[in-house]
Image (spheres, grey):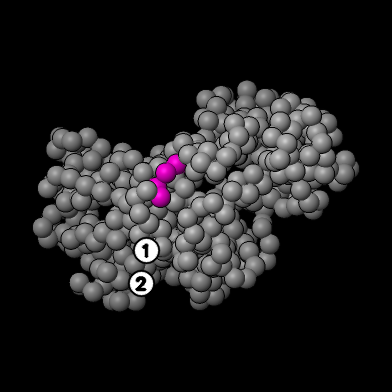
Amino acid sequence: MVTMQSTRRTFLAGSSAALIAGVAPRIAWGRTEADVAIIGAGLAGLNAARVLEQAGARVIVIEAEKRVGGRLHTLDDLPGAPDAGGIQVGASYRRLHEIADALSVEREIGEGTGAGRRQVPGNLYHVNGISVPSSGWAESPANALPDARKEVEPASLAFSYLATLPRLDAPADWLDLPAEADISWRQALLNNGASAEELRLIEANLNGNSLAGLSQVHIARSIAIFRAGSGPISTIKGGAQRLPEAMAAGLQSRVHLNEPVRAIIEEAEGVSLRLSDYAIRARHCICTVPFAALRHVPMQSDLSPPLARMISGLPYTRASFAYIAAKTPFWHEDGLPNTLWTDDPLIGRVFVLGDDPPMLKLWTTGSGADQLDRMSPEAASRAIVSRIETMRPSARGQLEVLRHFSWQKSPYARGIYHNIGTGMASDLAYATRWQGSRLHFAGEHLAQSASGMEGALESGERAARSIAKRL
């Protein structure tokens, strides 16, 4: 049901009780509204609500956005309804498939319209000012790699070093890695002989913000999760947002949309949430807000120092997209690979989303996303079209940027997904295991054995089951 509507006492988003007092509601409260209040109607919050309802708990879900889904967001108003987040259903997503089956949410085999598809294999590289397809990379003047590495394509450089990572027999083994394993991905690559040009190209389209800020533990965990999967990659039919919509519709509990939480106060007998015009009190609260956004919400709670450090500092990948319409599917005419992979930070990668309608998606991260976000939409669109036309001449006169989309500019996300930052693995492992007294946390950032959508479901389920035992 959806309706529009380490100190002993830790204060986040400020260090002063005045922050809490400053958001006091205009309408007073004096009773417990629910057994469990859940902040966030993404997959973690909705799954926690499902589990708690099945256990007989009274639940209320509070969502800051005007929609459910969190970082699962289907852009239904754009041609082809591409996804801006939560695109692929991984081979190991057991919980997601079980929930989708129970709610009759269909999936389709394939990468889908948010990740791009490759009708012609390989990449069209634009590196060092030169465009060259995969087939010509090794001999191209654009290739400044050491002689022994010239056969390795830019998009494959990081993969070529994966064997040097700490090997995890199971995805959750990252939780107990020794501290000496928690070095930056940059340092790990340097330790294994990576050249300056290799480092530059690996960082050009990193699923993170920088090689120095990304722990090799994060990469090792990602590889272990990938190896644990079996079966095909799929997508949710009609768009990823159809799943959280179905989950919300199946709840008996109310989902209050467009209700940002202004403050969180943990007390001896429960948790109070201060909203714009009123407050909610519950015996327990599960907060699923990404830590990058949560650190801007005043909060008073008994938090352990490692958890407080993660709320304050866990990094999230800065990612910005541009959705681009083409007059015709020109990528069929030039015989080149569909995907454009560049070392231009403003362009990053450009994927083909589909032929009917002909649509492209630009995806840039880190400093490139920052650069794109600092520009006006008009200036960014002109620069994007001009640069793509230079890199791929068959695109000339074909392109129109329909939408710019930035996850880090969203106050309720501030990034597309978390990373294990360099030196943070131990604190994050502790945070995933932490169980509060009244205030609890969940989200993809607190998964132990999964990532992405499955990780969000996993953490929401774990928090809900922990609370259910106490009710």
Amino acid at dot 1: Gly
Residue range of the region highlighted in magenta in the rendering: 181-185
Image position, residue 23 (x, y; %): 21, 39
Spot occupied by residue 103 in the image (x, y as percentages of width and height): 51, 73
Position of 191 relative to 389 (above/below): below
**Amino acid at dot 2:** Val
SS type, badge 2: helix
Q: What residue appears at the point 40 percent right and 39 percent down from the top-left corner? A: 411
Asked if one can make out residue 438 in the rendered structure from this viewpoint, the answer is: yes
Left or right: residue 451 compared with residue 279: right
Picture quadrant where residue 360 is located: top right
Viewer-side label of 2, 1: 1
Q: Which residue is mark 1?
A: 460
Q: Can residue 286 be seen by looking at this rendering?
A: no
Dot 1 falls on a residue whose secondary structure is: helix
**Is 300 in front, or is 419?**
419
Cβ atoms at labels 2 and 1 below 8 Å apart? yes
Q: Is residue 69 left or right of residue 121?
A: left
Asked if residue 187 lies left or right of residue 132, the reply is left
Q: How many other residues sit within 10 Å of disc 2, few (<14), some (14-19) or many (≥20)?
A: some
According to the image, label 2 marks what residue?
51
Magenta span: predominant SS is: loop
Residue lying at 88% horizontally and 40% vertically, measured from the top left:
334
Q: Earlier in the sequence, mark 2 or mark 1?
A: 2
Closer to us: 106 or 88: 88
On whether residue 184 falls in the magenta region, the answer is: yes
Q: Nearer the viewer, residue 145 or 460?
A: 145
Is 308 displayed left or right of 125 in the figure?
left
Residue 324 lies in quadrant:
top right
Q: What separation in Å lies between label 2 and label 1 (alpha carbons)?
A: 9 Å
